[in-house]
Image (spheres, helix red, strand yellow):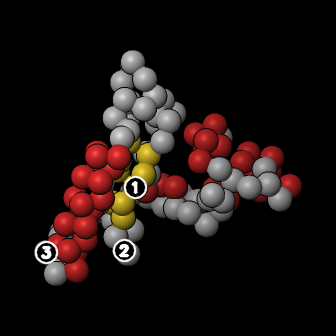
Amino acid sequence: MNLVGIDVGLYDFDRHNAIYFFIVSPDEDIYLRYGGRDAASADSYLDLDSFVLALEAGLEQHDLWQAGELPSRQRPKALFPREMERLKTIEMDRGRCIECHMIGDY
């Protein structure tokens, strides 16, 4: 995924996890994130059953959002990849795709 236009300030960066899925509202409020690990394995908490539970919880949050019953959260300060000078100079200005792992690196 090319992250050029994504507000990466919304998301916690955790380089110790294999994968995270963020379930967000149309207003970009994060309902929840799915993923994680423990010392035993990079996919300790990743299985189809837990993913289905996370998606169901996300749909419940979305129903609350649609009904106007989900309080808005204060947004973190916006941060776009183009504002990271080294990332912009070394990667973006050369036409390279900006990927998740690069955000933490730069």
Tag 1 or tag 3, which sits nearer the N-term? 1
Query: Mark 3 and 1 residues: CB-CB less than 8 Å, in contact?
Result: no
Residue reaching furthest to the left: 69
Task: Return the x and y of residue 2 as percentages of the image width and height.
Answer: 66, 59
The residue depicted at 37 percent of the width and 29 percent of the height is: 44
Q: Is residue 83 visible?
A: no
> Crowding near pointer 3: few (<14 within 10 Å), some, many (20+)?
few
How many tags in the picture? 3
Mark 3 to mark 1 CA distance (whole Å) = 20 Å
Q: Is residue 26 above or below residue 57?
A: below
Instruction: State the SS at label 3.
Output: loop
Is residue 85 placed above or below 57 in the rendered structure? Answer: above
* Residue furthest top in the image: 40
Indicate the position of residue 12 as horizontal and vertical percent values: 43, 45
Query: Circle 3 is placed at which residue position?
Result: 69
56 left or right, relative to 90: left
| Residue 26 rendering spot, x and y as whole percentages | 38, 75
Disc assigned to residue 2: none
Using the numbered discs, state the Cα–Cα distance from disc 1 to disc 2 in whole angstroms: 13 Å
Residue type (three-letter) at the residue carrying disc 1: Phe
Q: Measuring 22% from the left and 80% from the top, which residue is drawn there?
A: 66
Q: Tag on residue 27?
A: 2
Q: Secondary structure at mark 1?
A: strand
Question: Measuring 36% from the left and 24% from the top, which residue is drawn there?
Answer: 38
Residue type, label 2: Asp
Q: Give the foreground label among 1 and 2.
A: 1
What amino acid is labelled 3 in the image? Glu
Q: Which mark is residue 22?
A: 1
**For the residue labelled by badge 2, is the local secondary structure a helix, a strand or a loop?**
loop
